[in-house]
Image (cartoon, rainbow, N blue to C red):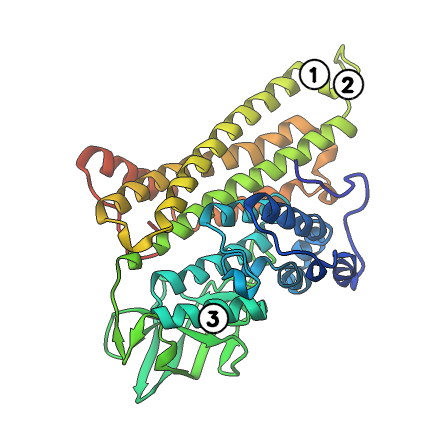
Amino acid sequence: MTAQPDLAADATIEPDGASKIIAAAPDWQSQPTPTNRAEWVERGAEVARLVATTAHARDVAAADPVDETELLRRSGLLGLQGPIESGGGNADWATVLAVVAEIAKVEGSLANVMGWHYAYFWLFRSFGTAQQRERWEREVTEQRLLLAGIANFRDDPIGARDEGDHLILHGGKQFNTGLPVADRLVIGVAIEGTEDVFFVLADAHDPGIIYGNDWDTLGQRSTGSGSARVEGVSVPWDDAIGFSDKQFQPRGANLTPGLTSQTLMPTFYLSLARGALDRAVDYVQHHSRSWLHSPYERAVDEPHVVDGFGVLQSHLLAAEAFLASASEKVSAALDDPDSITPEYRAELAALLSAVKTVAVETGIEVTTTVFELVGARATARRYELDRFWRDLRTQSLHDPVGYKRRQVGAYLLRGEHPLAVDWYS
């Protein structure tokens, strides 16, 4: 169980309280860089314990995770996938997911920002040329840069005008997670008059990138996922991912980015559910009272409470095991991304659609049913149980679970391959 702040205390913080988490952070830079999954997960847990203390206030204010992102930088977590010689961890994808899970157990918004950073980092390996990958992985790791994207596939691509050795970008998109705290942006563009989308890497602080500051949602309120406009931003052709001499260099690994995003999402869902269950257990153990007419003195002895928690724990453990198995399969495949065949890519996509179906259903079950087991007083905002449900409910709508079930059924019945050309399969 991830350590939680004192649930009996008021979870609000002073307006300048977020800066206190920086002062309270360990001196990670004087410590050795983690060298294995267990050490990186512990580093993630250290960050999570600090982030948990500011989550409520940021959620209420829909505030951007500025200091929390700084914790990711100082802890070295932004370089988790990066080269060891640059201070990174050269971690496999299963380790990435395990670290994201530690954050998501206490705070869904920062986990979302962090997870997409890792997914965009993967684009260097799945699309980038050898020279681009070497340069960008080193820079992101050494400079502890945060990646985000203007790449929502549901909107039209950003228009790109070819100006010789540069591209000039114009356009806008909704849902740009992490943009207000990012250092570099992956932008999905298409040459004007064409529909072939590709990615470029741009400076998030370019004055031509205008953040809408219009993110106000039920959950995931601290992700800064509002609208963005791109007005006259100039990007060198050298920063068009996967291009050499203005020609795209196709690779088998081009099919792999959806494997990263589609393992991140169920990781978010089940980790939020685990966080909600952990918090509910703590509440019942320390704060719940037995019912007025109950023969039991303690809430932990109430048969319906014991049974209810037993059901939720059983379902969640099963879903977590399913996700862990699938994550290891994906991670092993990503160790050699150019060798993944279309047939194996389809098998993994169908598997992840099944995982996502189970994760959404189990996550919603856990984060809603806990309220029936903790008692009315636990609905107070300061106990934050609602935040886990709101974060999960909001993000689980990212792509309809009904389409996930159809992919599973079509693959089973007709051998139909899920699409492998975007983030959604």
Q: Name the residue: 56% across, 37% down.
A: 273
Q: Which residue is mark 3?
A: 185
Tell me if residue 178 can be seen.
no
Question: How far is disc 1 from disc 3 in space, using C-alphas?
Answer: 52 Å
Asked whether, in this view, residue 54 is left or right of residue 330, the answer is right
Between 114 and 309, the one lying in front of the other is 114
Residue at 81% x, 59% y: name it: 14
Q: Quadrant of residue 9?
A: top right
Answer left or right for 64 relative to 246. Answer: right
The picture quadrant where one finds residue 88 is: bottom right
Q: Are marks 1 and 3 in contact (CB under 8 Å)?
A: no
Using the image, tell me which numbered label, if any, was put on residue 127: none
Instruction: Count how many numbered circles sit on residues in the image.
Output: 3
Contact? badges 2 and 1 (CB < 8 Å): yes
Seen at 62% across and 33% down, the residue is 277
Q: Quarter-wise, where is residue 5 in the image?
A: top right
Q: Residue at x 72, y 16 (%)?
A: 301
Image spot of residue 312 (x, y percent): 56, 26
Between marks 2 and 1, how big is the CA–CA gap? 7 Å
Determine which residue is flagged by label 1: 302
Q: Is residue 374 visible?
A: yes
Locate residue 167 relative to residue 381 in the image: left or right: left
Locate residue 149 relative to residue 347 in the image: left or right: right
Q: Secondary structure at mark 1?
A: loop
Name the spot of residue 347 as percent of width and height, x first.
Answer: 28, 41
Mark 3 crowdedness (10 Å alpha carbons): few <14, some 14-19, many ≥20 = many
